[in-house]
Amino acid sequence: MVGIQAQMSGELAVMPGERLAATAVKLWPEAGDSSKARWTYDEGVVWKGMEGLWLNTGDARWFKYVQHQMDRLVNKEGDIRTYKPEDYNLDNVLCGRVLLMLYKVTGQEKYYKAAGHLREQLRSQPRTSEGSFWHKKKYVEQVWLDGLYMAQPFFAEYAALFHEDSVFADITRQFVAIEKHAREAKTGLLYHGWDESKQEKWADRVTGHSPNFWARAMGWYGMALVDALEQYPAGDAGRKELVGILGRYAAAIVKVQDPASGCWWDILDKPGAQGNYLEASASSMFVYTLAKGVRLGNLPESYLGAAKKGYEGVVKKFLVTGTDGATNLEGTVSVSGLGGDPYRDGSYAYYTGEKVVQNDPKGVGAFLLAAGEMDVLGARGLGKGKTVMLDYYFNGEHRKDVTGAQIRFHYIWDEMDNNGYSLWGHLFRQYGMKTDSLAVAPTVEGLKKASIYIVVDPDNERESSVPNFIQDRDIDAIEAWVKAGGVLVLMGNDSANMEFTHFNRLAERFGLKFNFDDYHKVTGNQYEMGAFTMTVQDAIFPTTHKFYIKELSTLQLSGPAKAHFSDKGNVIIATAKVGRGTVFAVGDPWFYNEYTDGRKLPAEFENFSAARDATQWLIKQTYTK
């Protein structure tokens, strides 16, 4: 597997996150005794980190590991081993995010049902008078920063997926409330916990907050902010409030970053104090929060310096190679809490007295998350400030989801199953581009903000009762946009699955014609029947040698169109230079998840590599005034 920055430079390198993930697989094997599996948040953080590795590399080993681990805990009815909803423990909600991912990718009902159990817990979770979730039923009236990460990103993702729009106001209120009660105005740091009753031994009798700024608590809280914000609808009123909270948070943690190492101290405001130490999990969480906050546009670019310094510090100080050659993570405090039995008083002596261990899953998971963000950081400059727009008008299929709501599907950005372009969209975003869609007929004005416009498999009468056929006015607008410097991607399909007549009227403006054929048919799982091989290094696909396309329409060329890749005299991929613009054409939707996410095709097929190469090439063709 290859890191994103190394891929761009042509180097082959196994990145730190991948090395530590390999250690995690050995430490917590997927083939273990299922009767010993426990539903805990510790493993959930590791699984989220491995999900990021899968998305960044297209290597399905990480996905399959996560799925196998989850399947040890969730049966076919959606029941969760060892989960006790009556505990009302927010820690038990975190793994629900993995359930949602698995449901979106596989469509298996058991994951939906299991996630529904966690959603039901939140419906009746005890709350403070202001509406904040108690951390656990037994921790009466207490809100911990940890709990914001355990519950709110799942709450937001579930709401976004299943159309519970009112949930976002609830989430916003909870973030606002804990900042009000736990943030110290002088430093901007947040105390670990807050007790509304002010009766706990660890609670200040006036304010109710705990006495210290524990780094990992603030780490959880920062990750909660950026992960929840990622799910917020663009126009939601609470988005601005959360971005403001994140900005204040980021300013505070950068001030207490250790200038020498780039890492953060376990007790944030007491650097160098006796017993205090630089801590790996929190440092990784801060790196993740800053890097993701910048990537998603919720923090200024100026915070990248702190993220880079922090990441370099964690790698240098905490990643070590064992005698067996494995990569290990040192320096994670095993646990720190408040109250309980034996009682944890939240004092400085308590926090600094907890054990610091190697390869704690919370630290490993946090590092994997940070590495996933940092691996793509250096690649963002390629497409930064540019937009790739995917047609949702000519391809506009809808269906009912599990809630009965009508949703768009088939070759769209946010669809994670086999038919979606979620992985291709992730690639574009890795290179700094914004992914957008056009759900109305294209016009010169409507295409202005797009640097790349992708039209895939326009609907025929079988796919839509009232298909939007490409009209002359659409063709004129698209041609004018290309001539002005736009990059147009035309992706066809085989003869049974595409509307050819109107699509070819558009293609013919650029010397292209999709043939009404069905080339490269494949029988069952005989994948070699769909194999194409690059015999020389290719200008568009420099790191790709073997890829898979089945049942596609071949191309006829004229005028400016040039064959880029042919097979036995049949044109498979073509390009055209028109004015300042570029056209790329292939007779298949090709880069959808079934071909790129590694779950189905044998490992020797490099379709993810092809998608990555093509993405870079397309961005490089974009016109800059």
Image: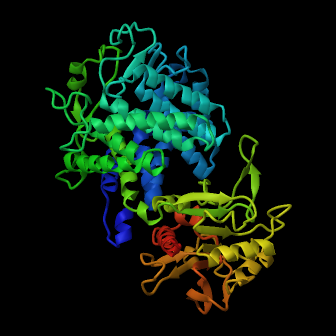
Compared with 598, 184 (above or below) is: above
The residue sitting at the left extreme is 274
Looking at the picture, how far across and down is residue 264, in whole percent? 26, 37
Can residue 65 be seen here? The reply is: no
Image position of 354 (left or right of 554):
left
Of the 4 image quadrants, the one containing the N terminus is bottom left
Q: Residue at x 28, y 31 (%)?
A: 334
User: Closest to the observer: 86 or 453?
Assistant: 453
Q: Quadrant of residue 483?
A: bottom right
Q: Is residue 417 above or below residue 444?
A: above
Question: Is residue 616 visible in this depiction of the protein?
Answer: yes
Residue furthest right in the image: 465
Question: Taking 207 as reference, is 345 left or right?
Answer: left
Color scheme of the displayed model: rainbow
Residue 165's image quarter?
top right
All told, the count of numbered labels is: 0
In-front residue for pair 66/167: 167
**Horizontal and vertical percent for residue 524?**
63, 70
Q: Position of residue 257 (x, y in %)?
A: 26, 39
In x, y percent, where is residue 340?
35, 15
* Residue ID at (69%, 73%): 478
Q: Measured along the vertical axis of the image, is residue 371 above or below residue 281? A: below
